[in-house]
Amino acid sequence: MELKDITTSASIVPSSIKTWLEPNNIWILSQDRLKVPNTNLIPAICFYNGTFVPIHAGHISVLENAKQYINNLGTHELLAAYISPSHSEYVAKKLSPDELIGAGHRLSMIYLAIENLDWVMVDLFEMFQPCKTSLGIVMEAFISRVHSQLPNGARIDVFWLRGEDALFHTRSPDNLIRLGFRTVYVLNRRCNENMVNKNNELKSIQDYHERRWREIQALSSFPEKFHLVQATHMNLSSSIIRACARNTSTTFEQLNLCIQLDKITTYIIQHQLWSTRSTMISALPVFPNDITELTPELLSFMLSAYSNSSIQVNSFMFEQIGVGKGWNGSLYRLYDIQYSPDSNDCLPSSLILKLSTGVWAGRVASIEPEFYAKLGPRVSNIDIPKCYYVARHPNSPKESLLLLEDLSIEYDPLGSKESLADSTLFLLIASIASVHAEFLNHPLLRQEMFAWLPSLNSTLTHYYSQYALKMADREFTQLLESRVSHEAYTYAQALVTHIPHLFQTLTDEHYTLSHGDFWINNIFLRRNQLHRLVLFDWQTCCRANGLIDIVFLLRLLDINRARSLELLLLELYHQTL
């Protein structure tokens, strides 16, 4: 099966990132999968830290082999294990820039991988620190929380799980063991056989492991705190997975052979992680020029392509929405969609159809299909509408069709700008900053497959043109000169020639994925989860400095309110980055 064959499948992948991106209190250890002791043995907890970019079956093997080993000691009973993903700053130093993915993607894959392990949980303390924190501080905090928060915490022994790579680290772990940890090395990968072959005294990889093991114990002040587990060699590597995903000719089977977890393979393909494969915009058998040309057969074709299965729509109703709001096109809600009796129960009961002319307020704004097909799946730190189908008009390339989820089912609009609480504005800034952080200076955005993404969007170009026209109007400039200081007027004149240069310089210094029209009309809040928002209308997105989005948000507030909050909002923005 080719990768492209399942990029539209949604049978496994969750529709949106869950609420772990905004944990209420990262100090509190989750206990929802903590087992109740069944014996009088010493209760045990595992701590497993790492980058997990991505998690794979080898990581799961470490957890399962450690569990079996600890329970077979005869002295301990394992109650749970906690995975501690590394802080993004640490990941950025370990990986090359083009290998980085959003924190939301890392967490989503971890949760998918452990969803059937009812004794494994995720600890977000390390990942959501304000900045990279030393492992000693993270582990001291973990054991302190175990002892103070978990039932009978004072009795619990904590086992630090380590992979085969750690066996060859030169730094002694004694300072961490001194905190109260036991160390378990689970060997389920083959070390470099060349290392073994260079030494005639060693007959096998196992000999090499055992000699290194004896060296570690001899150098440690706590040899009794070290445990070695020889497991089945899986020889899986996250770096090999990333390299395999980058290969445009890789099939699903080849990638899954590197991962050995179907759900993670599917997730990587659906979200196009590490891939430079150019996703093609679909072609419809018949392109509907207006809603009257959308037939049940055509809707069936689009939904079948999305789900990679046969779906039959028998009928639907429609209503036009958003008339006269913001952009030049037609927006419809398809509702009361009736499917054939043998169709999947999870099919949507309503959808949004967006027929775009590609021109918005006199400006060309036609890149939204590319966003949803090529870039949207890679966004992890904010919700975007689920896209069921995207197509361009065969004879008019600027015109397009988008079949999107109906946000009114789970989301509510923000309301008027006057009704926005300061806390909501801070949420908006933190949310867009998390998107900017995910793509900040990312080489991906400069690759040929994203050549459609402009460095200055049509909205900014439009406002600049309007400004230049006004400054060429003698009557306007005379009025302006009479109302501002000479210094301000001089700056206003200079901006005519310097605006493009200023924005391009900002973009050249620090670029990211900018929404380009970040304003409350394009943002909904998830109902009953008011810290989760969805951002839509991506037709003016661009590769630019993220401050463009902040300016767009602040410019439509009352000027006094904008000025009073500006410094606080900018501080939050840069802290989030």
Image: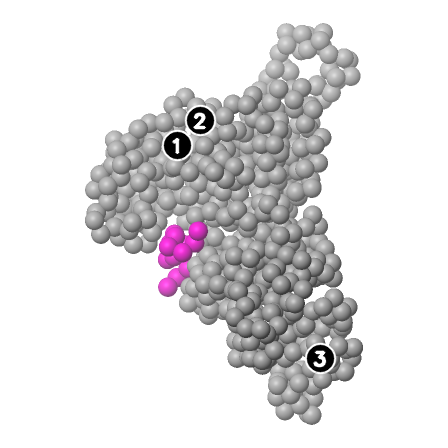
Q: Quadrant of residue 487?
A: top right
Residue at horizontal 64 percent and vertical 10 percent from the top: 476
The secondary structure making up most of the magenta span is: loop
Picture colour scheme: one colour
Label 3 crowd bin: few (<14), some (14–19), many (20+), radius 10 Å: few
The span shown in magenta is 1-14
Task: Look at the numbered discs 2 and 3 and tell me whether their residues touch, using CB distance below 8 Å.
Answer: no
Residue at horizontal 62 percent and vertical 27 percent from the top: 554
- Disc number lying in front (2 or 3): 3
The spot of residue 468 in percent (x, y) is 62, 20
Residue at horizontal 67 percent and vertical 19 percent from the top: 560
For mark 1, give the secondary structure: strand
Label 1 crowd bin: few (<14), some (14–19), many (20+), radius 10 Å: many
Report the front residue among 43 and 83. 43
The spot of residue 136 in percent (x, y) is 74, 62
Residue under label 3, please give it: 224
Quadrant for the C terminus in the image: top right
Label 2 crowd bin: few (<14), some (14–19), many (20+), radius 10 Å: many
> Does 510 sit above or below residue 421?
below
- Disc number lying in front (1 or 3): 3
Report the front residue among 246 and 31. 31
* Nearer-N-terminus badge (2/1): 2
As for residue 171 lying within the magenta part, the answer is no
The spot of residue 482 in percent (x, y) is 72, 7
Label for residue 327?
2
Amino acid type indicated by mark 1: Ser
As for residue 12 lying within the magenta part, the answer is yes
